[in-house]
Amino acid sequence: MNAKLKKYLRKSLKITLWIIGSVIALFLLIVLLLQVPYVQNIVKDKAVSYLEGKIGTEVKIGRIEIGLPKKVILEGVYFAGQNGDTLIASDKLAVDISLMKLLDNEVEINSINLEGITANVSRNKDSVFNFDYIIKAFDSGKPKDTTSAPMKFSIEKINLDRVRVTFNDDISKNYVTANITHFDTRIKTFDLDKMEFEVPKVNLDGLKVKLKQGMIAEIAQNTKRLLKKLLKNQT
């Protein structure tokens, strides 16, 4: 190997190592910056502005904490519905997620903790849910690529504290309110592709459910009126 070729290879190797080192240094810098509250506030404000511009309703995030490579914490989350009422609100959302696996088209959630959750879901007489506008906002309109591998999704541990959910359905005329003081579980098997799930144990405390079945009440009322009419005709 002549001297000129050796010099060329040595120079190429140095450039390659410099590029690799720069990428690693940039990544480490981003990791460090994301630990700084000021930078986290900038990320939070950018996220809020993007979401509000995308869905067209009010969005609030009180605080965000990103601890690479796994931890993401959101506090004071609020999404307003199109009617101005609360769609979803949360005191705290903490997720232990393998962020690096997102690059491999895989969502691996080790644990998710929700505190102080309020969610109001409804469906009107036109069979439109009050969150449909969010789905439409993120729908590109392009046909899905059926040739690409589907994203893998797994979750291991769920912990819920102080949860309140309402569901008002104008189609079935069922109106439900559910409150949970505490819920936690570990999921042994979670396979969305095969729809196989195994939950060995669930801890549940303070469950309260109120159900108003409008359709049943309406049917009962109509039946009562019909019986009265039949009895009247017989007399």
Image (cartoon, rainbow, N blue to C red):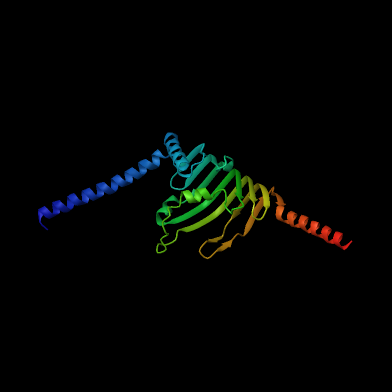
In the image, 124: left or right of 148? right
Q: Quadrant of the N terminus?
A: bottom left
Looking at the image, which residue is at 25% across and 49% down?
Answer: 17
Q: Quadrant of the C terminus?
A: bottom right
Looking at the image, which residue is at 31% across and 46% down?
Answer: 23
Q: Quadrant of residue 92?
A: top right
Nearer-the-camera pick, 105 or 230? 230
Question: What is the tally of numbered marks visible in this picture?
Answer: 0
Across and down, in percent, residue 111 comes to 53, 51
Looking at the image, which residue is at 57% across and 62% down?
Answer: 197
Across and down, in percent, residue 156 comes to 54, 55
Q: Quadrant of residue 115?
A: top right
In the image, 94: left or right of 31? right
Which residue of the protein is positioned furthest toward the right in this rendering? 235
Which residue of the protein is positioned furthest toward the bottom in this rendering? 194
Across and down, in percent, residue 122 comes to 61, 49
Nearer-the-camera pick, 223 or 128? 223
In the image, 211: left or right of 33? right
Across and down, in percent, residue 59 comes to 51, 40
